[in-house]
Image (spheres, rainbow, N blue to C red):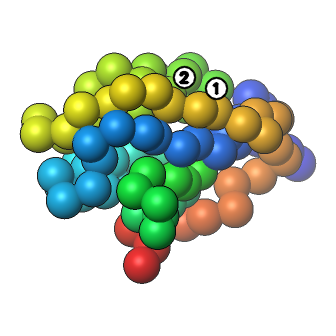
Amino acid sequence: MAAPGLWSVDYEVYGDVQGVFFRKYTEEQGRKLGVVGWVKNTTWGTVTGQVQGPKEKVDIMKNWLRTVGSPMSRIDRTVFSNEREITGLEFQAFSTKY
């Protein structure tokens, strides 16, 4: 049976987001909220990833990715894509990919 109200969204964060512990703080925030997914640096200077969990927690994480980030980061914009309802979580935890 599918869990009710599970959502998945992909994201890419633009700005000064590499070398400022953005991935570490994103992973910590995801674990604190109880969502799953991943985060990683891109070769073009952005941070990308995916978040999955209950819609209200995914929305909180989206707002965090758009407005908070790590203390030393500067977020210029965050692009969300492929937002959809899912029947089950595809990850066990929130992790950093390399």
Numbered badge on residue 59: 2
Above or below: residue 45 compared with residue 74: below
Quadrant of the drawing holding the C terminus: bottom left
Q: Is residue 89 above or below residue 4?
A: below
| Residue 3 spot, x, y in % from top left | 76, 41
**Residue 59 location in percent, x, y?**
54, 22
* Front in this rendered view, residue 13 or 8: 13
- Indicate the amino acid at tag 1: Lys
- Quadrant of residue 33 in the image? top left
Q: Position of residue 88 (x, y in %)?
A: 76, 52
- x and y, in percent, of residue 76 in the image: 38, 27
Residue drawn at (24%, 32%) of the image: 74
Residue farthest to the left, as pictured: 72
Q: Residue at x 43, y 39 (%)?
A: 14
Q: Badges 1 and 2: C-beta atoms under 8 Å apart?
A: yes
> In the image, what residue type sits under mark 2?
Asp
Q: Residue at x 69, y 55 (%)?
A: 89
- Is residue 16 or residue 89 the one in the foreground? 16
Q: Residues within 10 Å of mark 2 (few under 14, many from 20)?
A: some
Q: How many marks?
A: 2
Q: Is residue 41 left or right of residue 91?
A: left
Q: Which of labels 1 and 2 is toward the front?
A: 2
Q: Which residue is mark 1?
A: 55
Residue in front for this viewpoint, 38 or 48: 48
